[in-house]
Image (cartoon, rainbow, N blue to C red):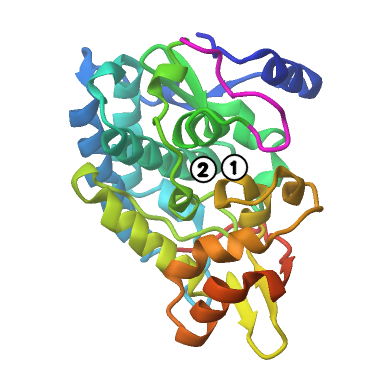
């Protein structure tokens, strides 16, 4: 079971000496080959059941932080995890359109992270496990996919790491064929990476993917993830928008801490609810000083 990385990605992984951890080989007994669309819908329904159960296992007085140990003991998690065994024989060629691919792979990513936190015994942060997003993944259709493979290679149209040149997957590889054809920046607000600063956990359906992505983007961008002082002309943005600055129309230099970040403001303006803030970002983004908040990697709630 291999991943078809390009040369820059192979060098990156070799430098980190990463070996894969395949979570679904021990999840249960693989079923006969399954249509990716059907399997994706089954996983979405089961994952949504799990999400509902998450709200009942808060471990803090403010009902925000989740006790993943309790999640692991629940029937909803056991059923969802057993379903991941079916991914080994998934027919990914049945996922033809971008909307089908987006819904399927966003749901896989969001459940994979929850599953990995539990299976690896993560206690405080995913940073406890070296190479969490590169090493941990599923066997899907006979190929290994890590969280970063899904995010960088599939959901970002095979763009690869922003700070590493070149695509994630080799051209014409089985992995690259799974990628969406066009990058949609809103996808960044649909992925939950188990950190406090992440967007909330959600699971998506192909038929409503556009409206769900729009809702996810507006919800995140109108939270504390974006703070704009109109009078002072300053904006504090989530670190996500710096890491993936090119996806929001800014120079790759912004990812490295340089360059003009104002194109990000112009891109997200359409989702901002506050009229005064939105007008400023639409018409005079260049005058706004941008900084990016530190990312909180402590385990999240829902």
Inspect this view and state whether residue 184 appears: yes
- Residue 191 screen position, x and y as percent: 47, 49
Q: Residue at x 46, y 17 (%)?
A: 175
Label at residue 118: 2
Q: Does residue 13 sit above or below 263 in this rendering?
A: above
- Residue 77 screen position, x and y as percent: 35, 44
Do the numbered discs 1 and 2 sit on residues whose CB atoms are within 8 Å? yes
Q: Residue at x 60, y 24 (%)?
A: 167
Residues 211 and 109: in front is 211
Specify start and end residues of the magenta stretch as a single range. Answer: 161-172
Would you identify the image quadrant in which residue 55 lies? bottom left
Q: How many marks?
A: 2
Label at residue 129: none
Label at residue 121: 1
Would you identify the image quadrant in which residue 178 lies? top left
Q: Is residue 227 left or right of residue 192?
A: right
Q: Is residue 185 left or right of residue 234?
A: left
Q: Secondary structure at mark 2?
A: helix
Q: In the image, is residue 18 part of the stretch drawn in magenta?
A: no
Q: Does residue 231 sit above or below 178 in this rendering?
A: below
Q: Residue at x 71, y 43 (%)?
A: 252
Q: In the image, is residue 164 part of the stretch drawn in magenta?
A: yes
Question: Callout 1: 10 Å neighbours few (<14), some, many (20+)?
Answer: some
């Amino acid at each position: 079971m291999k991943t078809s990385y390009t040369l820059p990605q192979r060098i990156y992984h070799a430098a980190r000496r990463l070996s894969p951890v395949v979570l679904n080989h021990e999840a249960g007994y693989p079923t006969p080959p399954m249509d990716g669309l059907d399997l994706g819908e089954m996983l979405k329904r089961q994952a949504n059941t799990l999400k509902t159960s998450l709200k009942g296992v808060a471990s803090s007085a403010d009902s925000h932080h989740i006790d993943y140990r309790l999640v692991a003991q629940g029937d909803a998690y056991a059923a969802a995890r057993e379903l991941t065994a079916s991914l080994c024989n998934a027919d990914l060629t049945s996922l033809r359109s971008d909307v089908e691919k987006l819904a399927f792979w966003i749901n896989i990513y969001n459940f994979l992270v929850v599953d990995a936190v539990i299976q690896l015994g993560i206690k405080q942060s995913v940073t406890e496990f070296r190479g969490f997003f590169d090493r941990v993944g599923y066997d899907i259709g006979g190929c290994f996919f890590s969280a970063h493979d899904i995010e960088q290679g599939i959901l970002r149209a095979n763009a690869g790491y922003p700070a590493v040149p070149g695509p994630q997957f080799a051209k014409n590889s089985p992995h690259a064929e799974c990628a969406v054809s066009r990058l949609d920046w809103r996808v960044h607000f649909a992925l939950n990476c188990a950190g406090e600063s992440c967007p909330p956990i959600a699971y998506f359906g192909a038929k409503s993917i556009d409206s769900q992505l729009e809702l996810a983007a507006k919800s995140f961008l109108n939270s504390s993830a974006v703070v704009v002082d109109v009078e002072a002309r300053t904006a504090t943005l989530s670190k996500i928008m710096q890491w993936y600055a090119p996806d929001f129309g800014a120079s790759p230099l912004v990812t490295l801490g340089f360059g003009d970040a104002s194109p990000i403001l112009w891109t997200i303006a359409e989702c901002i609810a506050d009229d005064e803030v939105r007008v400023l970002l639409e018409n005079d983004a260049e005058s706004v000083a941008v900084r990016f908040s530190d990312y909180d990697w402590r385990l999240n709630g829902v």
